[in-house]
Image (cartoon, helix red, strand yellow):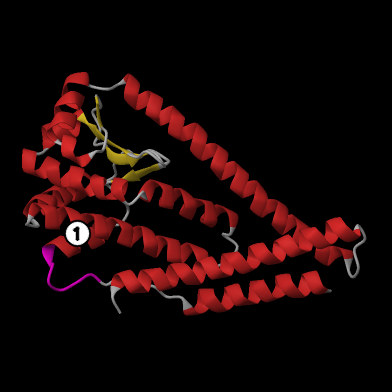
Amino acid sequence: MNPAIRLKCAYALMIAFVAVVMVHMGMLITYQIRNGVVQGPILNYALIDIVIAYTLGQIIWRSTRQLVLSQKWLRHFRANRHDKLTKRLNYKYRDWGTEIIVVQDDAFVALTLGLLRPKIVVSTTVLEMFTDKEIKAILLHERYHCRNYDGLKMFFSALLADAFGYLPIVKPILRYYQTWQELFADRYAIRQMGTEQYLGSVLLQLAKLGKLQRYETAVHFTNTTLEYRVMQVLEPDRGVHVPLALLKPFLRSCSILLLLMLGGDS
């Protein structure tokens, strides 16, 4: 199956599970508010109320954390901005319509920051480490994330992972989604450059560097999917196989869903 189609099907399956849980929770909350009296075993309703409270709490926590950290890192990057290099890159890639911020940092920093108005952030170290062609490949990768609002999608995915992590089907699908998110961005960069050479050179150098600094709430160029990305560059005609085992998580999620429904109907 085509990776894009398989990805959409898997994501739709996860959304279906989440939607069923949310609808059932909404029905239970509405029932308790209207009736005021619980019929059936109180323990069942207490456990379900705990699950509902946990889910809502995680949604509020993740949303608040995202807002605070996004503002924090944006202020940090703007305070450490290299004005001359920032102006140079924004002028060079003015046709992109995407803001680029160059920050003074000794670490490798290449990421997309922002939900509704995503920006590309790169460090002076990136500009020193790589050639102009390699830098363009990095920026094209990040441009793909900006054009597709992957920062917003990643936030939504993190929200689902936090709020509905008790559904076993959620996390493997989100890992699969994040992997292909990076692979698709690499494919875009390769198509725009017309060759795998420059992006491949960057990825191989990063593989040698090992663990790199990461910032929360951002879409990073150096993600945990580096192995698959290197494979895609080294063997472009072979295709990358990203495993997705869903049978056991699907059955376990169905069991949890059934327990929630039976508990609410008791």
Q: Residue at x 90, y 60 (%)?
A: 35
Q: Position of residue 54 (x, y in %)?
A: 68, 52
In the picture, which quadrant includes the N terminus?
bottom left
Magenta segment includes 235: yes
Whether residue 47 is visible to the viewer of this picture, yes or no, is: no
Q: Residue at x 14, y 33 (%)?
A: 127
Q: Residue at x 10, y 44 (%)?
A: 134
Side of 103 relative to 51 (left or right)? left
> Is 208 situated above or below 265?
above
Q: Which residue is mark 1?
A: 187
Inspect the image, locate mark 1, and give the three-letter code of the amino acid beneath it. Answer: Arg
Residue 228 position by quadrant: bottom left
Q: Secondary structure at mark 1?
A: helix
Nearest to the observer: residue 2 or residue 215: 2
Q: Which residues make up the magenta segment?
A: 234-240
Whether residue 160 is visible to the viewer of this picture, yes or no, is: yes
> Is 95 situated above or below 79?
below
The count of marks equals 1
Q: Position of residue 43 (x, y in %)?
A: 85, 64
> Is 241 situated above or below 89?
below
Q: Position of residue 159 (x, y in %)?
A: 53, 51
